[in-house]
């Protein structure tokens, strides 16, 4: 594997404009933000559509029209959206993303996610020809992914995303975002999901420290407003591109040049 650093620009996630006034939400806003992030050094972009309906088509088409980079779409549903709505959508989309991010444990206490639900989403992604991007926030989630991997459901996954919480997180499904936890999870994931590259990040003020630990350990990183709405000095971030630029500087300090979209495509083939 190249020593280049893949930076996945995570553009919005489940955040709201109340948390971040500059958050991109509409297809056009997400497309413009994706363009800025790729220009800043991201090799891949990750987005969450505002609703799980055919607006997903508009989001994917807009982002694809703005950047020639792999697109990862979150499959995380809200409680008011049924699992069937999520899985059925991939059978009718005109323009599918390159990857679908799949959670096996709730990324936040108010969101539903479960290993058996993930199994159905993984099967829907496979039918649509979309590669899975499994997400874990702690040791138990990595254990769930080991089960799914043993059942041959992760064979097409190009990497594992480790997304830790804030430093003081007490969520049982999401480890606190510390460098020590990041390294522990990276080591454990490598031991049970041998050969699968890792992309790591964390929420809020933990983001920069976890990126640094993961990149120094040879993993890749994620950066953007989904993970942090502030710069390391506490100033509000105005775009994901600012956070990508910081990740680029981190990689350069470690002798790891940013992986461009073309090289990122090779990673997901």
Image (cartoon, rainbow, N blue to C red):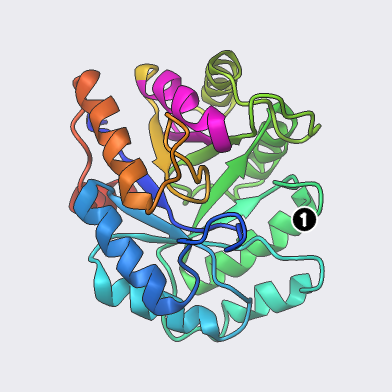
**Frontmost residue, 24 versus 156:** 24
Name the residue located 72 percent from the left edge and 38 percent from the top edge: 144
Q: Is residue 269 visible?
A: no
**Frontmost residue, 14 versus 122:** 14
Name the residue located 23 percent from the left edge and 46 percent from the top edge: 41
Residue situated furthest front in the rendering: 235
Regarding mark 1 in the picture, which secondary structure is present there? Answer: loop
Q: Is residue 220 magenta?
A: no
On the rendered structure, is 6 left or right of 109? Answer: left
* Residue 266 point in image, percent of width and height: 25, 49
Residue underneath mark 1: 111
* Residue 173 point in image, percent of width and height: 76, 36
* Residue 248 point in image, percent of width and height: 25, 35
At label 1, counting other C-alpha atoms closer than 10 Å, the crowd grade (few under 14, some 14-19, many 20 or more) is some
On the rendered structure, is 105 left or right of 229? Answer: right
> In the rendered view, would you say 144 is above or below 10?
above
Name the residue located 53 percent from the left edge and 56 percent from the top edge: 20
Name the residue located 56 percent from the left edge and 66 percent from the top edge: 125
On the rendered structure, is 162 left or right of 30? Answer: right
* Stretch in magenta: 195-215
> In the rendered view, would you say 198 is above or below 101?
above
Q: Is residue 199 magenta?
A: yes
Q: Is residue 206 visible?
A: yes
Quarter of the rendering containing residue 177: top right
Residue situated furthest top in the rendering: 180
Quarter of the rendering containing residue 87: bottom right
* Residue 74 point in image, percent of width and height: 56, 60
Q: Quadrant of the N terminus?
A: top left
């Amino acid at each position: 594997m190249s020593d280049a650093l893949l930076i996945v620009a995570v553009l919005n996630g489940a955040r709201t404009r109340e948390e971040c006034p500059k958050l991109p939400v509409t297809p056009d806003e997400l497309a413009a933000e994706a363009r800025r992030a790729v220009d800043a050094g991201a090799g891949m972009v990750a987005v969450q559509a505002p609703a799980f309906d055919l607006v997903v088509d508009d989001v994917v088409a807009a982002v694809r029209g703005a950047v020639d980079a792999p697109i990862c779409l979150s499959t995380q549903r809200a409680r008011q959206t049924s699992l069937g709505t999520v899985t059925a959508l991939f059978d009718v989309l005109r323009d599918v993303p390159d990857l679908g991010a799949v959670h096996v444990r709730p990324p936040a206490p108010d969101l539903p996610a479960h290993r058996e639900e993930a199994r159905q989403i993984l099967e829907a992604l496979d039918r649509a020809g979309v590669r899975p991007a499994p997400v874990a926030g702690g040791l138990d989630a990595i254990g769930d992914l080991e089960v799914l991997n043993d059942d041959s459901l992760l064979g097409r996954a190009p990497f594992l995303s480790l997304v830790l919480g804030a430093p003081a997180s007490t969520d049982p499904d999401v480890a606190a975002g510390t460098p020590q936890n990041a390294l522990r999870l990276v080591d454990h994931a490598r031991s049970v999901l041998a050969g699968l590259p890792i992309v790591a990040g964390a929420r809020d003020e933990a983001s920069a420290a976890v990126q640094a630990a993961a990149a120094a350990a040879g993993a890749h990183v994620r950066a953007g407003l989904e993970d942090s709405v502030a710069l390391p000095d506490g100033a509000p971030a105005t775009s994901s591109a600012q956070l990508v630029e910081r990740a680029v500087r981190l990689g350069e300090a470690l002798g790891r040049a940013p992986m461009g979209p073309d090289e990122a495509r090779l990673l997901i083939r």
